[in-house]
Image (tube, helix red, strand yellow):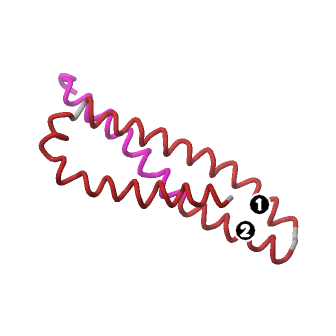
Amino acid sequence: MGELDAVLLARIQFAFTVSFHFLFPAFTIGLASYLAVLNALWLWTKEHRYLDLFRYWVKIFALAFAMGVVSGIVMSYQFGTNWSVFSDKAGPVIGAPMAYEVLSAFFLEAGFLGVM
């Protein structure tokens, strides 16, 4: 495999973190809309199977939301510690997409969580 220098280890660590962080927000945004449909169906029909499904999936939603928040926090620390020179040079370019990700994904998830 060769020699494991600090740059390669930082890349492996960041790839691991970003791959998990990429999955959790996408899953929770889709699951939040499914939960909204389940809750609306329960309110409309009063069938308890919809409420049971909602209660089951809301626990998974909460866990996935927490894991997305935790992996996002770790990812931001990795930008500051492992990639500080890169962040300094490319900050004006990558700062806007990162802010958009926070505004769209996190606030959308948090909004669904607040409604629930």
Does the magenta run of residues contain 22?
yes
- Tag 2 near tag 1, CB within 8 Å: yes
Helix, strand or loop under label 1 = helix
Q: Position of residue 82 (x, y in %)?
A: 25, 31
- Where is residue 89 shown, x and y percent of the image? 12, 43
Q: Which mark is on residue 53?
A: 1
Q: Quadrant of the N terminus?
A: top left
| Span colored in magenta | 1-28
Q: CA distance from mark 2 to mark 1?
A: 7 Å
Towards the viewer: 40 or 31: 40
Quarter of the rendering occupied by the C terminus: bottom right
Q: Residue at point 45% right, 58% down? A: 105
Residue underneath mark 2: 38
Q: Is residue 33 above or below residue 56?
A: below
Is residue 20 positioned above or below 32 on the image? above
Three-letter code, disc 2: Leu
x and y, in percent, of residue 63 in the image: 61, 44
